[in-house]
Image: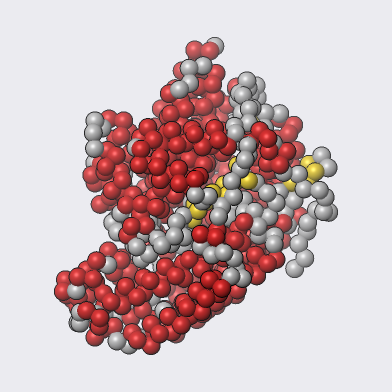
Amino acid sequence: MTLNRPTPQPVFSLAETAGPALGDLPGWKLSDLYPSGDSPEYKGDLDKAASMAAAFEEKWKGRLEAAAKATGDKGIGAALKEYEALDDLIGRIGSFAGLTYFSDTSNPANGKLYGDAQAKLTDISSHLLFFTLELNRIDDATMDACMANDAVAGHYRPWLVDLRKDKPHQLDDQLEQLFLEKSMTSAAAFNRLFDETMADLRFDIDGASLPLEVTLNMLQEPEPETRKKAAQALSATFKDNLRVFTLITNTLAKDKDISDRWRKFEDIADSRHLANRVEREVVDALAAAVKKAYPRLSHRYYAMKAKWLGMEQMNYWDRNAPLPDTSNTIIPWDEAKDTVLSAYGSFAPEMADIARRFFDEEWIDAPARAGKAPGAFAHPTVPSAHPYVLVNYLGKPRDVMTLAHELGHGVHQVLAGEQGALMCATPLTLAETASVFGEMLTFRKLLDDTRDIRERKAMLARKVEDMINTVVRQIAFYEFERKLHTARKQGELTSGQIGELWLSVQAESLGPAIRISEGYETWWTYIPHFIHSPFYVYAYAFGDCLVNSLYAVYQKAETGFQEKYFELLKAGGTKHHSELLKPFGLDATDPSFWDKGLSMIEGLIDELEALDNKQA
């Protein structure tokens, strides 16, 4: 299929033109993983992983039930240690290929490296697929005895217990093998098509051809006409490429429906809930609480903001506009670094020490450039290495908060790495805890240092908007996905039908103070979570509300909070959310839990209103 793209023009990058103001932006040092994709080390590890996987299959396949009754070198514990070492090696290879690709998705060599690595790792994983399936065929009594009698197997108890939750949704070995191998030409292929399409898109504004990240950033500019031009450019390019995005979305939704049906998941989001180790009822309670709060959160705030901007209604492109008289000064990279590290250090010196390593040891890629993956992420890689952070730093206050957010992930990943490759991964719902907590620490530090009423009002407004974007907007995204995947069961959806579903949830969540006009119906196209991780988005709202409650405990705690917080982060994937929150007196299964988190957002809006009255 031929993609509709603008005529090639010189690409403008805000990061390039504002270079002196931003300072020296760091790039990450991927050589900590491998010198290059052509290096003997990388190629040697690919060969090593392949031979180790084949040997592992030969040694253990069909023998795990007997191993569950043995100890030492012939026991399950020994098999688990070998499996974990392989998992770490495979993860290192995949991380290097993926991070190289996301550094510049427009580079054909990077695409080939990534595609080849995915294909080879899929082949390697096919030799390991039997392991978890066979483990789950061992009866519970035998496994319980195994974990009690074999100290090494007992070490992996959290992982083994967690694994058995997948048992009702496992298929037979041959079907699992088919699903794994076909993923390369189904979901993985369409994910890559989405990434490369997004990286190639250009948005024409006043003769300049801009990448996505820079164009989205212009929606935060103070001049209304600049925001309008950016929105119109976004809408025009999204519309030009609507056909391919509609195809990708339909294909992946159907692919998920097929998988869910074969695996006997009842609800369209149950596979995500299982992966997150969170109960459907908990997520339903979260979504219901947030939707009920729309009028007193987003509707109320946007009505206030429309008044500040001198409008009866804001256009959809004004949603993240700065307040009048807000400073538009570019924040240099070093200042952003010092701000975040200072906030982290005020909470716990150990937290700042870990975060500082990301700067000192070149674990961050910061410049916004053509071809680079948009947005931001923290990649854990593997415990034998270290995490990496990607941001597209443009010097805005929100970029500082994004840096604080991703470094929170990074600190979490470093601490959880102590659990080893099999148990370090944190479910998405709790994975957002450290990131949102890091943002909150940074925001509170900045707010405490601000005395000017106008600056304080601007900071509060930005924080409220960020929280609305994290909680209200993400639950609206979740509701959109629910509507889309439900409708897809009845047949393929047109771009117009998808646009109608998108507008319905946007109107409900944003409220009457936002005018949703022509063009916005295509903006579902650029949200990567819909493609890469269906129903991921509620994890942001979960994390934000959880952190709001957690931060309230911190504010009231006299001593000991930091120690309990670090224990939460170090746990990785070894404990359920109920067990991790218990030391703080919090319970996410309590329906009132979510109201506590939402009340903090409402309190900030109250403070904004009080400041507004003081200025009047």
Residue 36, given in percent of the width and then of the height, sits at 59, 65
In this rendering, the answer to whether 99 lies above or below 255 is above
User: In this view of the protein, which residue sits in the foreground, 49 or 196?
Assistant: 49
Q: Nearer the viewer, residue 525 or 366?
A: 366
Q: Say whether residue 561 is left or right of residue 600.
A: left
Q: Can residue 136 be spotted in the picture?
A: no
To which quarter of the image does residue 99 belong?
A: bottom right
Q: Which quarter of the image is occupied by the N terminus? A: bottom right
Residue 31, relative to residue 565: is it above or below? below
Q: Please name the residue shown 26% across and 74% down the image.
A: 77
Residue at the location (36% across, 52% down)?
415
Residue found 23% across the figure and 33% down from its top: 559
Q: Is residue 30 left or right of residue 273?
A: right
- Residue 557 sits above or below residue 546 on the image: above
Compared across the picture, whether 583 is left or right of 340 comes to left
Q: Position of residue 26 (x, y in %)?
A: 59, 46
| x, y percent for residue 127 | 44, 82
Image quarter in which the C terminus is found:
top right
Residue in the picture at 49% in, 45% down: 360
Q: Position of residue 10 (x, y in %)?
A: 81, 48
The residue lying toward the viewer, choosing from 276 and 65, is 65
Image quarter for residue 152? bottom left
